[in-house]
């Protein structure tokens, strides 16, 4: 089965009692048993739910994983992943990563004595240097948020494997349509399904995909035991969203490319971050590991000040000023005060994230309207 067919059919069967083509929303907390422990495979909805099972099979199919565990949010999925480790264990992560991930690692897990090194992973040699005898996992985000740097998944996964360390990729920004880390040697993939997979800015969800039976068993144990489960309605909406993933991504990437071209030719723009640009320092890595360059773009104004950037963001009409990304609608945001506010200012600066950076999540509207929206915002600053 090829990818576009998978988004519609992977793991999906018509519902056996009625023939419903879409999996029903099984809005139930428990399931009748014929005799104690004699049942249809479902006992209690914290453990499993058929709508959730359909979603998990679909996402596993898209990532080429043997299994997937769905969570109540991307953060819940990441939380479960780190809980595989114990005090004294060490994790290497990139220094340009989602603010909520940084907050989870440093404010929840460091107090439990799991230690982290945040490094520039765009040079894989830095991973090798950061390895210690206690390193258990390398946490990769690529493209990175919000600077759109690229990490060489295969190179870093190879280093991790040789050191006996797990490599885990947050694949939220690319989605499985653009990038399949497991095929490049990664051990597990984490998603915030809130973003491109759901695709319509109407749910919060997360997922972990892997072909390692011990990891999936651990994830299912945690779902059952700690209870960060997605509700059946949210699973249904995510499943429905995924069925158009390939169509939405194609349009969003095409729109993003047109917007990048517009920005790079605009004399009011300072710098533009987009892995599809040939001038991007890791364009060649992006070209080899991604099917397209995505629909996230970040840039600075030539007249680079926080005030100007904030003014620009308040002037757009179709680009809604909001956190999040990956929906059909275009969004604009100010990472320094929004998604990345939980990263201390000096650490943001060290990672190259300026307080005047503007981030776009390009949607699937008519690109002429999006460009004229940006145009009027440039004129208003
Ligand atoms: C949004 C996001 C998360 C967190 O996911 P939630 O669903 O909001 O909990 C993690 N990683 C990345 C890259 C994200 O964009």
Image (cartoon, rainbow, N blue to C red):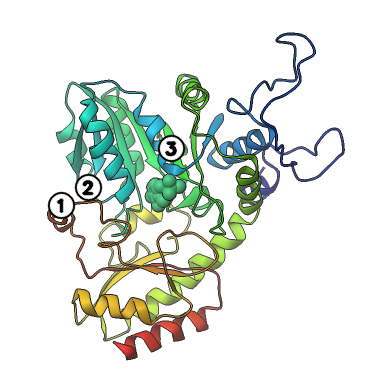
Q: Is residue 324 above or below residue 42?
A: below
Residue 106 in the image: state x and y as whole percent.
Answer: 23, 38
* For the residues bearing labels 1 and 3, Cβ distance under 8 angstroms: no
Which label sits in the foreground, 1 or 3?
Answer: 3
Distance Cα–Cα, label 1 vs label 3: 24 Å
Distance Cα–Cα, label 2 vs label 1: 8 Å
Q: Is residue 175 above or below residue 77?
A: below
For mark 3, what is the residue?
A: 76
Residue at x 70%, y 33% (from the top left corner): 28
Q: Residues within 10 Å of mark 3 (few under 14, many from 20)?
A: many
Q: Secondary structure at mark 2?
A: loop
Residue at x 33%, y 52% (from the top left corner): 285
Distance Cα–Cα, label 3 vs label 2: 21 Å
Any atom of ligand 1 within 8 Å of the CB at mark 3? Answer: yes
Residue 338 in the image: state x and y as whole percent.
Answer: 31, 61
First in sequence, mark 2 or 1: give its number.
2
Is residue 184 visible from the viewing direction of this image?
no
- Tag on residue 269? none
- Tag on residue 95? 2
Q: Secondary structure at mark 1?
A: helix
* For the residues bearing labels 2 and 1, Cβ distance under 8 angstroms: yes
- Tag on residue 347? 1
User: Which of the two residues, 346 or 225, is positioned nearer the viewer here?
Assistant: 225
Q: Is residue 308 above or below residue 353?
A: below
First in sequence, mark 1 or 3: give its number.
3
Q: State the image quarter where residue 167 is shown.
A: top left
Residue 117 in the image: state x and y as whole percent.
Answer: 18, 37
First in sequence, mark 3 or 2: give its number.
3
């Amino acid at each position: 089965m090829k990818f576009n067919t998978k988004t519609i059919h992977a793991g999906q069967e018509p519902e056996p009692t009625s023939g419903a083509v879409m999996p029903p929303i099984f809005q139930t907390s428990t399931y009748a048993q014929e005799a104690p422990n004699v049942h249809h495979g479902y006992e209690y909805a914290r453990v499993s739910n058929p709508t959730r099972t359909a979603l998990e099979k679909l996402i596993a199919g898209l990532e080429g994983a043997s299994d997937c565990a769905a969570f109540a949010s991307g953060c819940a999925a990441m939380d479960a992943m780190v809980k595989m480790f114990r005090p004294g264990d060490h994790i290497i992560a990139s220094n340009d990563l989602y603010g909520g991930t940084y907050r989870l690692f440093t404010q929840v897990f460091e107090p439990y004595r799991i230690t982290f090194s945040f490094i520039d992973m765009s040079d894989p040699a830095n991973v090798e240097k950061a390895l210690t005898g206690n390193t258990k996992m390398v946490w990769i985000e690529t493209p990175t948020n919000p600077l759109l740097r690229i990490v060489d998944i295969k190179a870093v996964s190879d280093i991790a494997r040789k050191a006996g360390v797990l490599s885990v990729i947050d694949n939220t920004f690319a989605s499985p349509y653009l990038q399949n880390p497991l095929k490049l040697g990664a051990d597990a993939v984490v998603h915030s399904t809130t973003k491109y997979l759901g695709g319509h800015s109407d749910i919060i969800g997360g997922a972990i995909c892997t072909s390692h039976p011990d990891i999936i068993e651990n994830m299912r144990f945690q779902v059952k035991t700690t209870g960060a489960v997605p509700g059946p309605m949210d699973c249904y909406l995510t499943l429905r969203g995924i069925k158009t993933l390939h169509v939405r991504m194609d349009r969003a990437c095409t729109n993003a490319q047109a917007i990048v071209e517009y920005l790079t030719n605009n004399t009011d723009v300072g710098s533009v971050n987009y892995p599809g640009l040939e001038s991007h320092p890791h364009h060649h890595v992006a070209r080899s590991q991604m099917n397209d360059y995505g629909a996230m773009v970040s840039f600075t104004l030539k007249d680079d000040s926080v005030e100007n950037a904030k003014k620009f963001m308040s002037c757009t009409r179709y680009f809604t000023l909001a956190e999040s990304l990956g929906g059909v609608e275009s969004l604009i945001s100010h990472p320094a005060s929004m998604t990345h506010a939980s990263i201390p200012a000096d650490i943001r600066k060290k990672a190259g994230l300026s307080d005047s950076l503007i981030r776009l999540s390009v949607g699937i509207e008519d690109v002429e309207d999006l460009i004229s929206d940006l145009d009027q915002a440039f004129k208003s600053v």
